[in-house]
Image (cartoon, grey):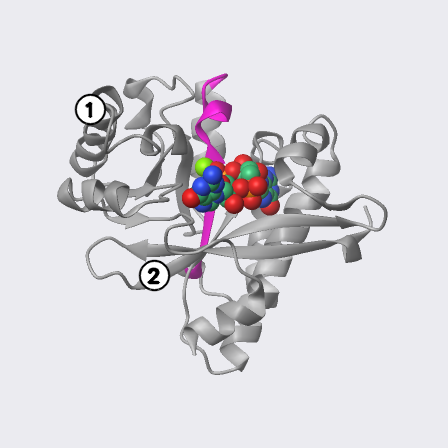
Amino acid sequence: IQQNQFFLHYQTKVSCDTNEVIGFEALIRWEHPEYGIISPADFIPIMESSSLIINVGEWVLSETCRQLANWRQQGLPAVPVAVNISGRHLHDESLVPFVKQITQQYDISSDLLEIEITEGVLTGDTEQSIAALQALKATHIRLSIDDFGTGYSSLSYLKRFPIDILKIDRSFISECDSNQEDAAICTAIITLAKNLGLQIVAEGVETAEQLAFLKQHECDIYQGFYFSKPLDSEVVATLLG
Ligand code: C2E
Ligand code: MG
Ligand code: MG
């Protein structure tokens, strides 16, 4: 892969309670010299069919740590950043040593790094997933399940995953304020997360009405275009400064 064609955008994670920015999610962008900017939704699934996805994941982890160190150098307040890691990379034995090495190299405290795993990858061999998550958790970084509610993961396994955060999938948020079924699913997921002692994040919040619904039902954190589109690192620096 041509590393100079990749860059990261950062989307804010905002407290439903205080409206403060409490962290970011790193989202990869590919700027192809001929085709322009290609969405990760188009190239990540293709790369997941080969070990290229591990190169991509390592690049995203190291670029995120480098950026965290750079913001620190600028005297900006420290905020956690979440990185998306694919299932193939989660199950690769190189991931845990790489996370240890890269956080050490940039002197990044483990509570500033979070890894998001899509729920769908945890539904196959669950015992193997639990073991992989446990090994990762031993590095003390925070773990979250992304796109929750779409992957049919068994609730009995949910309590065995060493996770910190659940992210409600965008498909339930888009009509949470107007559709009874979506509202019921969202409130059920929020209650489930709270009772399991997990933080709960709503993704894809686009309107004031959706946010009002989430605040009323005591969701912890939200992300979405309503607050901000994913931003480049310089805009993040001005936001933090
Ligand atoms: P995701 O992790 O669930 O990321 C959220 C996606 O929703 C992002 O799209 C984000 O730009 C978009 N989004 C955020 N707020 C809103 C909103 O209010 N409305 C709408 N309609 N969309 C919103 P993006 O950046 O295109 O990423 C798509 C997916 O690609 C991600 O879903 C993630 O699964 C994957 N991805 C992105 N970056 C990486 C990466 O570095 N590594 C891996 N393995 N996967 C990545
Ligand atoms: Mg994500
Ligand atoms: Mg998601």
Q: For the residue marked with disc 2, what is the amino acid? A: Ile
- Span shown in magenta: 112-125
From this view, report whether residue 182 is shown above or below residue 9: above
Question: Residue 70 placed where, x, y %?
Answer: 57, 74
Question: Residue 215 placed where, x, y %?
Answer: 18, 46
Residue under numbered circle 1? 184
Q: Residue at x 61, y 34 (%)?
A: 41
Question: Residue 110 placed where, x, y %?
Answer: 44, 59
**Is any atom of residue 97 visible in this view?**
yes
Front-lying residue, 158 or 8: 8
Occupied quadrant, residue 146: top left
Do tag 1 and tag 2 residues touch (Cβ < 8 Å)? no
Q: Residue at x 28, y 28 (%)?
A: 159
Residue under numbered circle 2? 22
Q: Is residue 227 magenta?
A: no
Q: Element type at marker 1? A: helix
Q: Element type at marker 2? A: strand
Q: Is residue 116 magenta?
A: yes
Q: Is residue 241 left or right of residue 179?
A: right
Of marks 1 and 2, the one in the foreground: 1
Per the model, the C-alpha gap separating discs 1 and 2 is: 27 Å
Q: Residue at x 43, y 79 (%)?
A: 241
Is the residue marked by circle 2 packed among few (<14), some (14-19), or many (20+) residues within 10 Å? some
**Is any atom of residue 85 visible in this view?**
no
Q: Is residue 166 left or right of residue 69?
A: left
Q: For the residue marked with disc 1, what is the amino acid? A: Ala
Question: Residue 183 placed where, x, y %?
Answer: 22, 27
